[in-house]
Amino acid sequence: MHYLLVLLALCTAVPSAYAADSESAVKEVLTAQQAAWNRHDLDAFMSGYWNSPELTFFSGAKETGGWQATLERYRATYASPGHAMGTLDFSDLRVEMLGPEAAFVRGSWHLTMAEGKNPHGKFTLIFRKLPEGWKIIHDHTSAAE
């Protein structure tokens, strides 16, 4: 009977430990994205996204489909002449594990721009654990009005 209780305790401890490891791995992706943005490395920032035509990105009322189109949207909005990337800060991160290979993330973003503008808003992300690691497969970002 004692062995059964020990086995039961081990089985229930593994999922919570696994969830904590997965949650940390998801947060690491966002930390790496923030660092890449702040050094103005858009290619490294995009490595947090699933490099697939099936990636979805919603911003406001616009939907962008695919990794390449999402990269081009970021380039046009933040890295083209007359635009600046600013300094990015993610905060209020809440990671909810949906299973061993999926996570739902909510948070806030804030950009500090040289010209004094400070756009900010909220985001929801869906992550999947893929062979190449945890990747964002869907991003829905809203800006404050």
Image: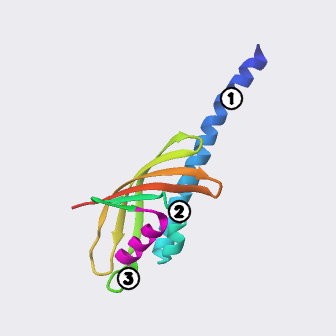
Q: Nearer the viewer, residue 51 or 37?
A: 51
In which quarter of the view is residue 123 placed? bottom left
Q: Position of residue 17 (x, y in %)?
A: 63, 40
Report which residue position mark 2 lands on.
48
Return the residue at label 3.
80
- Residue bearing the label numbered 1: 11
Q: Nearer the viewer, residue 6 or 55?
A: 55
Give 93 or 99, whichever is nearer the viewer: 99
Q: Main secondary structure of the magenta part?
A: helix
| Residue type at numbered disc 2 | Gly
Q: Secondary structure at mark 3?
A: loop
The C terminus - image quarter? bottom left
Horizontal side of residue 123 vs 54, given as left or right? left
Circle number at residue 26: none
Task: Name the N-terminal-most of marks 3 and 2.
Answer: 2
> What residue do we see at 47% from left, 78% from top?
40
Quick check: 86 above or below 12?
below
Horizontal side of 44 relative to 105 (left or right) equals right
Farthest residue in the bottom direction?
81
